[in-house]
């Protein structure tokens, strides 16, 4: 959650960019013509320790040099960061059993990642992204979900493990999106096959937490496996490229690798990964990233609240 100084700075930045790019921000029409792809509140990109207590306004551009941007918004300095184009990630472990963090997808999708299991009314569901389980709004509730994903050799009906539930569609009109998420009901015959444990991490905690700047997090994904990262932005707004269309997302979490000399925190195929903290508390649902190495994720509480589900996992001491 942003404090008043951060909120004022974020609002000032939003008003500024909406004013100078009215045909781009809030409109899907030719967003590639504008170099600014997003903004938010976080740490300074070149030196995470060199910043005010309230952080900076991070302005994300496709390439440098970018447009002339004010040095400050409100009381916070500006940091302009080259990230390239932000795209929704797609692309192996297989059964039995099925653990979280492995390849999964709708039969018409290459592959994404099984993030975690969630529960509602005594039923267990798979949680991942809309563009992984629902083929970016193209699927119909009741469609199968396969493990592994098709690019990893999965086929329907032999590899069906769940059926798609009604889902939140991604809005491509330019209106704000907050989640790219979908759930799929695990069939009775697969209830004992699909486990809630995340490979390399263990059982997630059932109670989620709220991300904060400089927080160390981890995930296990289909492509880059187990990686660690640091939260650098807790209120990022972005255009996200889905191939044929582009969608506007607001109030997203941004993660970078803890060591920039190492591979990125995520790559294509890691979409749907559950991001957790060092205590395995769920933080966010990974769905996109850029060639520069940033990862964009939905705050997990928004996902859980929309679907009215809870995470299947270890109960905390005070539960």
Image (tube, rainbow, N blue to C red):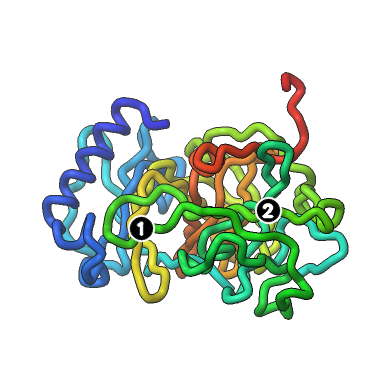
Q: Residue at x 70, y 69 (%)?
A: 146
**Image quadrant assignment for residue 307:** top right
Q: Mark 1 and mark 2 in contact (Cβ < 8 Å)?
A: no
Q: Residues within 10 Å of mark 2 (few under 14, many from 20)?
A: many
**Number of marks in the rendered image:** 2
Q: In this rendering, is residue 80 above or below 150? A: above
**Residue 160 pos. (x, y %):** 74, 68
Residue matched to label 1: 171
Q: In this rendering, is residue 246 above or below 306? A: below
**Residue 286 pos. (x, y %):** 55, 54
Counting residues from the start of the chain, the first of labels 2 and 1 encountered is 1
Answer left or right for 108 relative to 44: right
In front here: 178 or 184? 184
What label sits on residue 284 in the rendered view? none
- In 3D space, how far apart are the residues under numbered discs 2 and 1 (Cα atoms)? 24 Å
User: Can you say which quadrant of the picture contains the C terminus?
Assistant: top right
Q: Residue at x 80, y 68 (%)?
A: 94
Element class at badge 1: loop
């Amino acid at each position: 959650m942003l404090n008043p100084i951060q909120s004022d700075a974020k609002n000032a930045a939003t008003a500024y960019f909406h004013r100078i790019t009215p045909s781009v921000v809030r409109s899907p029409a030719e967003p590639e013509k504008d170099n600014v792809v997003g903004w938010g509140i976080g740490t300074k990109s070149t030196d995470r320790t060199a910043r005010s207590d309230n952080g900076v306004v991070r302005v994300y551009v496709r390439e440098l040099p970018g447009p002339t941007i004010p040095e400050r918004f409100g009381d916070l300095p500006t940091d302009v960061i080259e990230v390239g184009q932000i795209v929704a990630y797609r692309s192996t472990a297989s059964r039995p059993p099925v653990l979280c963090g492995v390849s999964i997808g709708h039969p018409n999708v290459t592959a994404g990642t099984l993030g975690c299991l969630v529960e509602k009314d005594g039923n267990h569901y798979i949680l991942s992204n809309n563009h992984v389980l629902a083929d970016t709004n193209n699927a119909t509730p009741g469609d199968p979900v396969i493990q592994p994903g098709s690019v990893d050799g999965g086929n329907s009906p032999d590899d069906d493990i769940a059926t798609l539930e009604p889902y939140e569609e991604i809005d491509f009109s330019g209106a704000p999106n907050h989640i790219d998420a979908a759930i799929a009901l695990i069939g009775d015959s697969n209830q004992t096959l699909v486990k809630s444990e995340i490979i390399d991490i263990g059982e997630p905690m059932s109670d989620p937490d709220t991300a904060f700047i400089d927080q160390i997090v981890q995930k296990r994904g289909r492509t880059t496996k187990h990686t660690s990262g640091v939260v650098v932005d807790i209120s990022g707004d972005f255009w996200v490229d889905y191939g044929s269309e582009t969608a506007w997302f607001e109030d997203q979490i941004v993660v970078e690798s803890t060591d920039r000399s190492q591979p990125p925190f995520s790559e294509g195929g890691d979409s749907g990964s559950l991001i957790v903290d060092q205590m395995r508390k769920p933080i966010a649902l990974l769905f996109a990233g850029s060639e520069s190495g940033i990862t964009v994720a939905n705050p997990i509480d928004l996902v859980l609240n929309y679907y009215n589900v809870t995470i299947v996992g270890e109960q905390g001491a005070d539960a």
